[in-house]
Amino acid sequence: MTLTHLARKGFSFLAALVLGGSAAAAERTNIVLIISDDQAWTDYGFMKHPLAKTPNIDRLASEGLCFPRGYVPTSVCCPSLATIITGKMPHVHKITGNDPAAPPGAARGKFYQSPAFKEGREVMNANLAKHPLLPVVLGEQGYLSLQTGKWWQGHFRNGGFTHGMTKGGRHGDDGLTIGRKDMKPISDFIDEARKQDKPFFVWYAPLLPHDPHTPPERLLAKYRDKVPSIHVARYLAMVEWFDESVGELLKMLDDRGLTKNTLVAYVADNGWIQNPETPRFAPRSKLSQYDGGLRTPILLRQPGTIEARRDETPVSSADLFPTILKAAGIEPAKDLPGVDLTNKEAIAGRKEVFGEIYTHDLMDLNDPAKSLRWRWMVRDGWKIIVPYAANEPNALVELYQVSTDEHEKTNLADKEAERVKSMTAVLDAWWKP
């Protein structure tokens, strides 16, 4: 931590020098990153959902910096998480889908157990390892880090975590019990970090509200008679169950007197609109090019350090990497596309948020274009979606005024030809495969 950072937290330069290494280390900002799994941007109390109960996430939104118009670059779990941990876009880190593609005709379940699948995942792991990873960068400055929940890249140490739950399973194996079973691995880790007098980073990415939608009956009962579908009731109960786990996590910080010295960041890895007819997701959400799969609130809370306010500027999950490093007193690398979300000038100076949509499976492990379906951009209240003709030859360009048409009901591409032309030029200048 720099002396400047200590001074911002109320220490004089002289006091920082007198305190010495150990005491200064105790004042390093801890980081807790909460990543919801498959939750629509609408499904929170503070986002005015009529039924969803999320008092603990609402607390983060009210006590911190709230960006209700956040985005992830792509609408499926694995590549979205890879962007969070690298700070880079999918076409750069090359984790563009959840899994290597199975050979034609192969049963997905059997392929997951095959040597070819394992080899493919190792290539994905190697591609990720080419980039500085958030736990690694923090670890170089003395942080201990804990992985819990979703983690696709094999053993937790592949992500540079010092501690973790996942040993190598596809979704996250043992890590997926966090939040559903208990929160003890996190409390134990925090206590261990305090014992060692080390700052800590917690990656809390539970399989919540992700299916299987198996909420406790006490929660399901709240929604069963309020919606016409049991599938919707189960999903909303899962949202509340996830929120309860967030409450447990915040209580750990409160009980240990760590609230003011901990940055809590929140994001959803991708959206989910519950299909009322089946347990699966509805169209225009997960895996889609629409905001139902891409938009998420992004929240940052550190009382006394981050001003509590709401900012309607579109931002990206790629911004979390430099934001977290700045909070830890670390200067981010210059090649990162994101900016520090607590820097008002940086946010105001960036005009666009970009993203890219791929197939669920990677058609080519090293060539993102082989799996690309759409590129998209949000700028000045408008969102353009441009299909990649090689893979989506019959798809049309779409243009929505998302500042007023939040659910993308009216495609204005035909009526706004000049806007389509100018926005496409900006999108191409960003990345054109």
Image (spheres, helix red, strand yellow):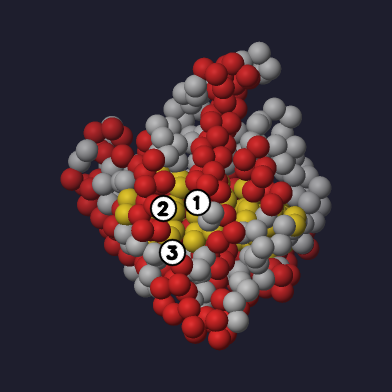
Above or below 83: residue 286: above
Which quadrant of the structure image shows residue 340?
bottom right
* Closer to the camera in the image, 202 or 377: 202
Mark 1: amino acid = Arg
Is 393 located above or below residue 261 in the figure?
A: above
Percent of width and height locating residue 10 = 63, 74
Q: Which residue is drawn at 49% across and 21% down?
A: 216
For the residues marked 1 and 2, what is the alpha-carbon distance in whole angstroms?
9 Å
Sooner in the amino-acid sequence: mark 3 or mark 1 = 3
Q: Name the residue under label 1.
A: 256
Residue pictured at 41% horizontal, 73% vertical: 22
State which tag comes first along the sequence, 1 or 2: 2
Mark 3–mark 1 CB contact (< 8 Å): no
Identify which amino acid the numbered label 2 is placed on: Ile
Q: Is mark 2 on a helix, strand or loop?
A: helix
Q: Do the residues labelled 1 and 2 touch (CB within 8 Å)?
A: yes
Question: Where 23 sits versus 251, above or below?
Answer: below
Residue 402's x, y, as percent?
Answer: 75, 50
**Residue drawn at x 32%, y 46% as measured from the top left:** 165
Residue 41 lies left or right of residue 238; in this view the side is right
Mark 1 nearby-residue class (10 Å; few <14, some 14–19, many ≥20): few
Instruction: Name the residue beneath numbered marker 3.
Output: 199
Q: What element carries label 1?
A: loop
**Residue 405 occupies quadrant:** top right
Picture coordinates of residue 6, whole percent (x, y): 56, 76
Q: Which amino acid does label 3 sit on?
A: Pro
Nearer the viewer's eye, disc 1 or disc 2?
1
User: Which residue is labeled 2 in the image?
Assistant: 190
Distance between the Cα atoms at labels 3 and 1? 14 Å
